[in-house]
Amino acid sequence: MIELFEVAGESDRRLALTATGILRTFNEAGVLTAADVHVAARVGLLGGESDERVLLALALATRAVRHGSVCLDLATVADVAPELPWPDHDAWASAVAASPLVAEGVLRWEFDLLYLDRYWHQEVQVCHDLLARSRATPPAVDEARLDAGVMRVFAGPTYAEQRAAARAVVTQWTTILTGGPGTGKTTTVAGVLALLAEQASLAGDTFRVALTAPTGKAAARLQEAVASVELPQQDRDRLGPLEASTMHRLLGSRRDNGTRFRHHRANRLPHDVVVVDETSMVSLTMMARLVEAVRPDARLILVGDPDQLASVEAGAVLADLVAGLGTAAQSPVVALETTHRFGEEIGRLATALRSGDADAVMDVLRAGGSGVEFVESEDPAPLLRAEILEAVLEVRACADAGNAAGALAALDRHRLLCAHRQGPHGVSHWNRQVEHWVTEATGDPLYDEMYVGRPVLVTANDYGLGLYNGDTGVVVRDADGTLRAAIAGTSGILSFATSRMSDVETMHAMTIHKSQGSQADQVTVLLPPEDSQLLTRELFYTAVTRAKEKVRVVGTEASVRAAVATRAQRASGLRQRLGG
């Protein structure tokens, strides 16, 4: 998210007109919004706190959550705008620690970090529940059958890493299974489920599996990937069909409360195994809700890539879990290192990005090859037009012919990814640009919002329709000539009247954040200028690893080097708690 905002004048709604003192200074500088200021002022009044420094810290803690952090780090927050009159750190920390708001539990001060009470409780709860699971007596396992099963399910010399990982997963209650794209995480999960199903049948136990992911698209990919893994027939029969769902659907969303669910500590999930894919996208709040809902005697398998972007909400849970638990004597972190999916060039680029080696990144981009292309141009549109338009027209042709499956498949052949939503490097600009190219190529003015071939991205959960934030689809012409939205759901293709699709946006281009949990054969990444506050290594890595066959990076050497050098920093105390 953007760190600062530019005040648009005295009437800017983000200005708190009644603010005074240091809160006013930071508000007018674009650091604090009116909401941050009003929250601090009101809570300070109710809690008997008048020290401007404490009120500033409270306002900044509110802002921190909005920008993805769980808490406020007083030691680093000044980096946002060094030119402002920040309080002396030691005196500021002492004032916060002695505040009546901390004494009353409205704010929490720990690890030299300032928390809003809600997020402190969630972090403590996640830590407590995970450590309790790690200290429990390990699950009973028939070692002889496990040895035989591992060799049966993961036969062949190329599966040595998977065999070691599977053994670790089966013999513990909680596992954090990490690895980059193409390292075989899903193959390992499918094999582990087969091994657990065998163990359950030997013991005469139930075997109920929950496959889940933060978004509908990620859940659909997980279900498809697990089903496509080749297993011995006896193991596939024992495992049976598996259906994935979003985390909200698994936990049981409530219409009266957006952060509470039907399953919780007093009403646990019935499943014996819970697998969460794309865990890097899971916020602290969702992780707290999930962990409390999983039975203590059920296996929890958290799968993801800690080098990817974190959740758009507060928290960087997967990275914290890996850092906090990775060095434990009996660590639940299991890492897969060998890449099997990528071509050589994409794999080298991803490795260079993970290691933060800007020179190596540039070497791969300059060398090019069948899997990587680097486009340096101040006006890339003419250079990109032909390939982007070809992919878009293929989607449109299938949609116009009523071939929903073909249109959805064509949609996954190319993805145009942007860091920003607005501006010349943003999604809005490029969606308009592609629509202009379509009009030039077809003569269709695209007057109707729901035009044939329009790719759509669902932006809000609709439990009535069974649609979830992140689902993708295409507007298709039906047999009778009417237009309908074909959505790739977790259970297959869903079809809806276009009039029912209110929370969707055009997806000729999409943000890199929204692309998490999805893949495409080819990906074009539009890097913003080097001074962009969104440009980070995690953003670049996430974009690159969406590609299966080829990635085209559009930008300058300066923007590439800026991305590699800049890490996404989120304040959190979870790794300290887990490691302590």
Image (spheres, rainbow, N blue to C red):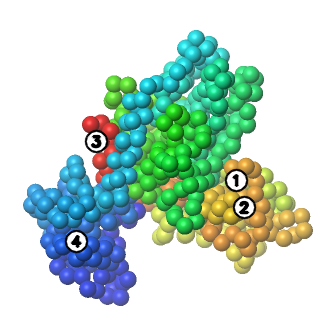
Residue found at the far bottom of this picture: 11
Expressed as whole percent of the image width and height from the top left, the position of residue 29 reads 26, 75
Q: Which residue is mark 1?
A: 489
Quadrant of residue 8 in the image? bottom left
Q: Amino acid at mark 4?
A: Gly
Q: Which residue is mark 3?
A: 576
Q: Which residue is mark 2?
A: 474
Q: Residues within 10 Å of mark 4 (few under 14, many from 20)?
A: some
Quadrant for the N terminus, please. bottom left
Sequence-first tag of 4 and 3: 4
Sequence-first tag of 1 and 2: 2
Residue 322 vs residue 103, the one in the foreground: 103
Q: Secondary structure at mark 2?
A: strand
Q: Secondary structure at mark 4?
A: helix
Q: Secondary structure at mark 1?
A: strand
Question: Is residue 531 shown above or below 226?
Answer: below
Sequence-first tag of 2 and 4: 4
Question: Is residue 509 shown above or below 111?
Answer: below
Spatial CA span between label 4 and label 1: 48 Å
Tell me the residue at 44%/58% (across/down). 313
Q: Residues within 10 Å of mark 1 (few under 14, many from 20)?
A: many
Spatial CA span between label 1 and label 2: 12 Å
Expressed as whole percent of the image width and height from the top left, the position of residue 533 reads 36, 61
Spatial CA span between label 3 and label 1: 39 Å
Q: Amino acid at mark 1?
A: Gly
Question: Is residue 161 shown above or below 399?
Answer: above
Is residue 86 visible to the viewer in this orientation of the structure?
A: no
